[in-house]
Image (cartoon, grey):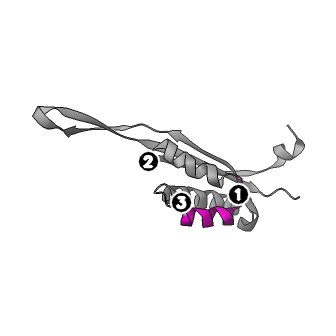
Amino acid sequence: MSVDMKEQKIAKAHGRFLRGSVSKVRRVLDQIRGRTYRDALIMLEFMPYRSTGPITKVLRSAVANAENNMGLDPASLVISQATADMGPSMKRYRPRAQGRAFAIKKQTCHISIGVAAQPDS
């Protein structure tokens, strides 16, 4: 591991038990990973997916953590980590024909976003 990686401060934020499929959240996170904070906000604003709302909220929280706890400038932040893990499924039952019950699994996910200062190039 290089010296720069050890010194790099990463501010994180987590959104837990958020409604939505992990695969649908990951397709948005894959688009914003590695981008600057400003570019990511613009992309999230114009993407046509429902999961952009919770992702934006977690991203803003991570940037607020970086600004308040580490004294970093929001204009210089880059999304260094963005992951989505599966949460517990809520199990519900829907009535069907002839007295049968149909299981419905309402999925949840955990979103983690880490931001770091942009490396000087």
Decide whether residue 85 is among the magenta residues: no
Mark positioned earlier in the residue sequence (1 or 3): 1
**Is disc 2 surrounded by few (<14), some (14 to 19) or many (20+) residues within 10 Å?**
some
Q: Label 2: which residue? A: 20
Report the residue at 77% width, 57% height from top.
Answer: 117
Residue 73 occupies quadrant: bottom right
User: Rounded to the nearest whole Å, what is the CA distance between mark 1 and mark 3?
Assistant: 17 Å
Q: Label 1: which residue? A: 35
Report the residue at 64% width, 55% height from top.
Answer: 32
Report the residue at 60% width, 58% height from top.
Answer: 59
Whether 86 is drawn above or below 60: the answer is above
Mark positioned earlier in the residue sequence (1 or 2): 2
Residue situated in front as seen by the camera: 53 or 96:
96
Q: Looking at the image, can residue 120 be seen?
A: yes
Dominant SS of magenta comes to helix
Q: Check residue 57 in the rendering and tell me which mark sits there, or answer none.
A: 3
**Is disc 3 surrounded by few (<14), some (14 to 19) or many (20+) residues within 10 Å?**
few
Residue 77 percent across, percent down from the top left: 73, 60
Kind of residue sitting beneath label 3: Lys
77 horizontally vs 99: left or right: right
Range of the magenta residues? 34-46
**SS of the residue at dot 3?**
helix
Mark positioned earlier in the residue sequence (2 or 3): 2
User: Rounded to the nearest whole Å, what is the CA distance between mark 1 and mark 2?
Assistant: 23 Å
Between disc 2 and disc 3, the foreground one is: 2
